[in-house]
Image (cartoon, rainbow, N blue to C red):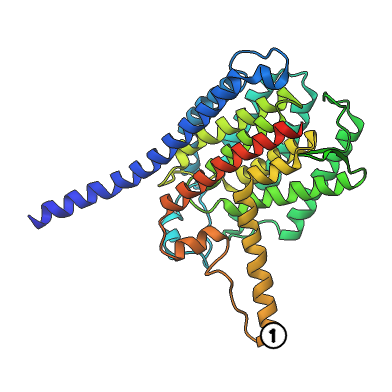
Amino acid sequence: MDAAIVIVMLISVPLMRIRNGVLLNTGLIIFLVVVLLYVDWCAWRIVRLPLSPFHLTCPFFISAALAACAGYVCVPFLYVLKIRQIIRIEGPVRHSLKKRTPTMGGLFFVPVGVIVAKFIAGFSSVEVSGVALATLAFAAIGLLDDTLSLIKNHNTGLSAWTKIIMEVAVGIWFSYWLHTTKISSPYGMKMLVPLPALGLVCLGKCYLALASFCFVSMGNGVNLTDGLDGLAGGTAALAFIGMSIAVLPVCSDLAIFGASMAGACVGFLLHNRYKASVFMGDTGSLALGGGLAAMACCTGMFFPLFVSSGIFVVEALSVILQVLYFKTTKRMHGAGRRLFRMAPFHHHLELCGLKEPVIVGGAYVISSTLALCAGYLGLISA
């Protein structure tokens, strides 16, 4: 009798884990599909121009299917090459169980999102070409970081300042490209930021600083969020959909890029759901952040960007506040104190007793709301 109970428990626990991941993915996909179908249905009212049927839904589904299929080929290959995740020693104890999980999953889903967007939007689309290059540039930074981490066999690849300098360089290049390239926009977008109620605000040279800040903050924000199974991929998919809606009146081709990247994230989530069989690594997380930042810089939709990326903002702020609080209390009291049990914030929630699927599910709900708000803000701003 006892043996039978043990066998049932051994079978039911993995099934529960699989079920939790499947339920989260299913709910996320249903929400995204409903939103995209609704936006496609009333897109002509938004843009005032005829768009192709399923303008956003089509690239989303194609990218999701191709990324999922690519995962079934690439994930076993990553296992064979033993490209495994380096787990932080100071992280939660339960994360030590993930040390054999392969990483650098961004290698197979990021290119899918970029290629599908280029194919559907057309290879002549200047905006998609620029945003795609910025995304791949950030993916290259992440790939270099991941490779150095594997070589050192330690969770330190590029130094923090080296990464920031490289990210700022991409931001400066992108701003220069925007300034020298003719891009399509209903009002000739050049260093202008549309804001609700205020209309168009000209930032001039400050646009350069804002662009670089967005690239650095978004890249590192997604990177810090990538700590739980499905957390970064799902919230990034929602952020891309929010940005796709926001930029639709400004540049419909970039809306295709956002939908395609969201689909690639969903295809990746089929392999990254709880319990994950692969992680995206810095290759994927930096690329996603770079893609979001590039969409905002190309259209001036910075406000919708930070709204749709609210989870990434909170995660980044939690790390900044933790460090500042520790250093301040160390100077005042001689011993540093911590504001959170552990940063980023999702680790704090873990140590408070919440399970991974609960944290990820809550993040999905919040990100869904933020994505809709960002899309609405973008539409009324444009």
Q: Residues within 10 Å of mark 1 (few under 14, many from 20)?
A: few
Residue at image location 44% in from the left, 65% down from the top: 352
Residue beneath label 1, please? 332
Q: Locate residue 254: give its quadrant.
A: top right
Q: Nearer the viewer, residue 211 or 118?
A: 211
Q: In this rendering, is residue 240 above or below 224?
A: above
The residue tagged with tag 1: helix, strand or loop? helix
Q: Position of residue 243 (x, y in %)?
A: 67, 35
Q: Nearer the viewer, residue 183 or 164?
A: 183
Q: Nearer the viewer, residue 234 or 171?
A: 234
Residue 275 appears anywhere in the view = yes
Residue 144 appears anywhere in the view = no
Q: In this rendering, is residue 73 above or below 104?
A: above
Q: Nearer the viewer, residue 382 or 133?
A: 382
Q: Locate residue 123: give its quadrant.
A: top right
Q: State the quadrant of the N terminus.
A: bottom left
Q: Position of residue 226 (x, y in %)?
A: 56, 50
Question: So how many labels did they put on this image?
Answer: 1
Residue at image location 61% in from the left, 33% down from the top: 241
> In the image, what residue type sits under mark 1?
Met
Q: Position of residue 53 (x, y in %)?
A: 60, 13
Residue at image location 60% in from the left, 20% down from the top: 40
Determine whether, in the image, residue 75 is placed left or right of residue 184: left
Q: Position of residue 19 (x, y in %)?
A: 33, 41
Residue at image location 85% in from the left, 40% down from the top: 175
Residue at the bottom extreme, as displayed: 334
Q: State the quadrant of the C terminus.
A: top right
